[in-house]
Image (cartoon, coloured by chain):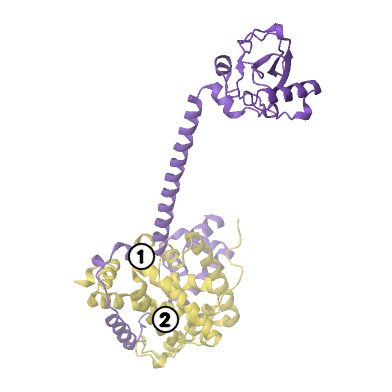
Amino acid sequence: MLTEQTDEQLLTLALDGNEDAFTALYRRRQGPVYRFALHMSGSPQVAEEVTQDVFMFLLQRGRGFDPSRGAVGAYLFGVARNYVRRAMEKSHSEAMMTTPAEDDDPHLVTDFDPVSDIARGQTSRVIWKAVLSLPEHYREAVVLCDLQELSYAEAAEALGCAIGTIRSRLHRAHEMLVRKLQNSAPALAGLSGDAARCLS
Amino acid sequence: MTCREFIESAESLSPLQLKLMESKNENLSAHARECSGCGRWMESQRLLGGALQVLRAQTAQREASPNVELAVLQAFRAQGFEPVADVAPHRAAPAAWQLSRFFEVGAYLAVAAALIVGLFLGERMWRDRQAPPAQAQVQKTPAPQAPKLSDDKLPERLRTETAQKSANSAGNTGPIASAKRPQVADAKSVATTIDRQGFVAMMLCDPLICSGEEQVIRMELPGNASTSADGNGNQPVIADVVVGDDGLVRAMRIVNQ
């Protein structure tokens, strides 16, 4: 019954004191919020703290949500973005440059092919390191559009900017990622620079 | 397809979308094969898309631990919720809205005050316009006070005669030194009334020009020029004459009768 409700309806019910609605909303939205924080910070601890803070914020200030300004999902990403920024200011670069401990994670998808697993692990480490080293506003665009698979419009709502801004940030972020991958693992990426700059 | 068209269509796609589109859009693939620059860019985007896909797949199932859910639900239970419908409007309204209401009421009060002041001033202006022009003129230029004439300013002969007269008939006339110029209220009253100091207004005064400076001049007339009631025609007549700055006589009074 509650699973058929929209996020906005669940939020209204939750703020009216309906615990089941709040639980349903939490279970629906905690994964994306957690992964956003994880991709942005590179730290599972920071991601957990941010997820908890985001839903605490929703409990206390959820009445301030304005449906005309965007969806609940985009609103939560916007709140998470601020908490990630705050957490990273607190524990600056140390958390940023660490990769997740995949072996300890029970939720991690595993592959039974060890060779493929090693290759994937290497690839993910390299790309994650490259993503984490991007400037914050480029990283947000890559995380939301490429990793969370949000549309440009949804990402623009979450970040509070125009769709064109998202588009240009993504374009610039992809160029930077290609360059970083070239420098860090040319054999892995097999990339060459200055692509698509011929305008014949 | 030109390189420009290739860039316009390919750069609007994310690396993952590009990877999917490549197989569907033959034009993109064909141009990438023909143009080495676009081909290299396409290859780099495909590899980037592949790497991002690996990262995404690796973290796709990751979620917050159950401890987070427990903590959040405990906070939910600890929070006393009020039903939305029961929240009074002033509590549900944001502070900015309440502030704007305050300024709105202030603006209404200011407009009301301005209207009241405007009505008051308008009513006063209307009354001023309704008032007669002569009266308005008198209000604007109050009648000048007559200069006090002291004894030392009088001619010597007049002063001695006056002293004798006052010694002979004390009480009949007031002191000469205190003679004052008559208060000319307006032209009509000048022509028709007798003022308090015994001055008799003259008919020569034109209402339009009788508003300037005046002065009181004491004059002595020969006794045969007047006929007194007691038949004492030889006694000279002393009179105060109010003369305007145009030389016309405004009023006069007989002092020694």
Instruction: Please determine whether, in this image, residue A12 is positioned above or below residue B250.
Output: below
Same-chain check, marks 2 and 1? yes
Query: Mark 2 highlights which residue?
Result: A50
In the rendered image, the vertical position of residue A12 relative to residue B196, given as above or below: below
Q: CA distance from mark 2 to mark 1?
A: 19 Å
> Quick one: label 2 or label 1, which is nearer the N terminus?
2
> What type is the residue that disc 2 sits on?
Val
Q: Please indicate, yes or no, whether residue B50 appears anywhere in the rendered image.
A: no
In this view, which residue lies farthest toward the front?
Answer: B168
| Residue A21, horizontal then vertical, whole percent | 24, 74
Q: Quadrant of residue B222?
A: top right
Q: Residues within 10 Å of mark 2 (few under 14, many from 20)?
A: many
* Secondary structure category for the residue under label 1: loop
Tell me what residue is drawn at x 75 percent, y 21 percent.
B161
Residue furthest out toward the left: A1
Q: Secondary structure at mark 2?
A: helix
Residue B231 in the image, given as x and y percentages of width and height: 63, 8
Q: Are marks 2 and 1 in contact (CB under 8 Å)?
A: no
Which label was assigned to residue A71?
1
Image quadrant where one finds the C terminus of chain B: top right
**Residue B173 shown left or right of residue A128 in the figure:** right
Q: Note whether B128 is above or below A49 in the view shown.
A: above
- State the residue lying farthest toward the bottom: A104
Which chain does the purple colour mark? B
